Image (cartoon, rainbow, N blue to C red):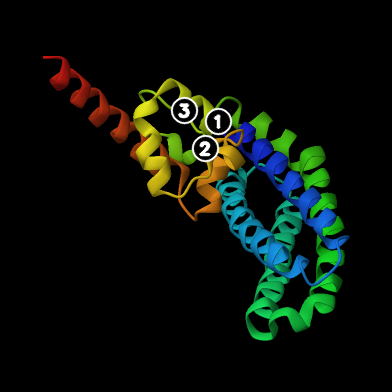
Amino acid sequence: MRAIDRLRRDHEILRTKLDVLEATLRMTPPTTWFILRELCYTLSRQLQDHIRREEELVTACQQRLSPDVRSHVRLEHDEEPQLLRTVNHLFIEEGGKAVEQIRGVLDELIPRLRRHMDEEETELFPAIEEILGDQEEPSAQGSSPPVKLHEEMTVNHVLRTYPQTKLLLERLFINVPYEGYDCLDEVAWRRGMDCCQLVLLLEEAITVGCRCEEIAAA
C-alpha cells in the first residue's frame, strides 16, 4: 500500500471510531462506562500507531515541508495523545465515578481530532504525496509482499477463502459474527498486535492446514 494511502485509511478508521464514541456519549450511564473505557483504549492505540506512521513520513519529507507545517503536526501529536492518556488514567484511578469528567475531556478531544484530520488532508497529505509519490509505507519497504493475505481483507473473506484459519481465529478470540466485516488491520489494532504479525500467523495457519490436507490425501 502507498504510504499516503495508508494514512488516509487510518483517518477513515479513526473517524469511524470517533462516530461510535460520540454516539456512546449520548447513551445513559452507567452502562456507558464499560463501553467508553474499551473505545478510549482502542482509540488510543490506533492514534499512537497512526502518529508513528505519519511522523515517519514527515521525517522523510522534512527538508521540503514548511517549518510551520512540521511545528503544527508536532504540537497536535503531543497534545491529542495526552488528552487520551488523561481519559485512560481517569478510568483506572476513578472508575465509574469519573464519567462526567471523562465526558468533558472527550467533548474537547473529538472535534479537535476531526479538525486536525481535515487540516492534514487539506495541507499535509497533498505535500507528502507530491514528495513521495507512489512510495510504499516504510514498514513495507525491503520486505516480501504477503503471499496470500493483505491487511485490507475482511475476516469473513479470509475465513471463507481459507477455512484453515478458523482455529487460529478462535484462539485469538476474534468474534467472527461481530468482527467479520472488519479488515485485518483494524482487528489487529483491537488486540494490540501489528497487522503484519496477524497476517503472518494467518498465513502460517493456512500453510500448515494445506500440508495436513496434502498428507491426509496421500
Name which residue type carries label 1: Thr
User: Is the residue 2 above or below the residue 139 in the image?
Assistant: above
Relative depth, front residue between 10 and 187? 187
Classify residue 128 as left or right of residue 216.
Answer: right
User: Is the residue 97 above or below the residue 102 in the image?
Assistant: below
Q: Contact, CB < 8 Å: mark 1 with mark 3?
A: yes
Disc 2 or 1, which lies upstream in sequence? 1
Classify residue 13 as left or right of residue 137.
Answer: right
Instruction: Give the SS element for disc 2.
Output: helix
- The image shows residue 207 at horizontal and vertical percentages of 26, 28
Q: Contact, CB < 8 Å: mark 3 with mark 2?
A: yes
- The residue under label 1 is 154
Q: Contact, CB < 8 Å: mark 2 with mark 1?
A: yes
Q: Residue 158 carries which label?
A: 3
Name which residue type carries label 3: Val
* Residue at the image point whose x is 34% and y is 40% from the top: 201
Instruction: Give the SS element for disc 1.
Output: loop
**Quadrant position of residue 179:** top right
**Quadrant position of residue 23:** bottom right
Q: Residue furthest top?
A: 218
User: Is the residue 85 above or below the residue 54 in the image?
Assistant: below
* Distance of label 1 from label 3 (alpha carbons): 6 Å
Classify residue 117 as left or right of residue 154.
Answer: right
* Residue at the image point whose x is 61% and y is 42% from the top: 178
Question: For the residues carrying marks 3 and 2, which lies nearer the camera in this image?
Answer: 3
Relative depth, front residue between 77 and 173? 173
Q: How crowded is mark 3: few (under 14 residues within 10 Å), some or many (20 or more)?
A: many
* Distance of label 3 from label 2 (alpha carbons): 9 Å
Q: How crowded is mark 1: few (under 14 residues within 10 Å), some or many (20 or more)?
A: some
Q: Which mark is residue 184?
A: 2
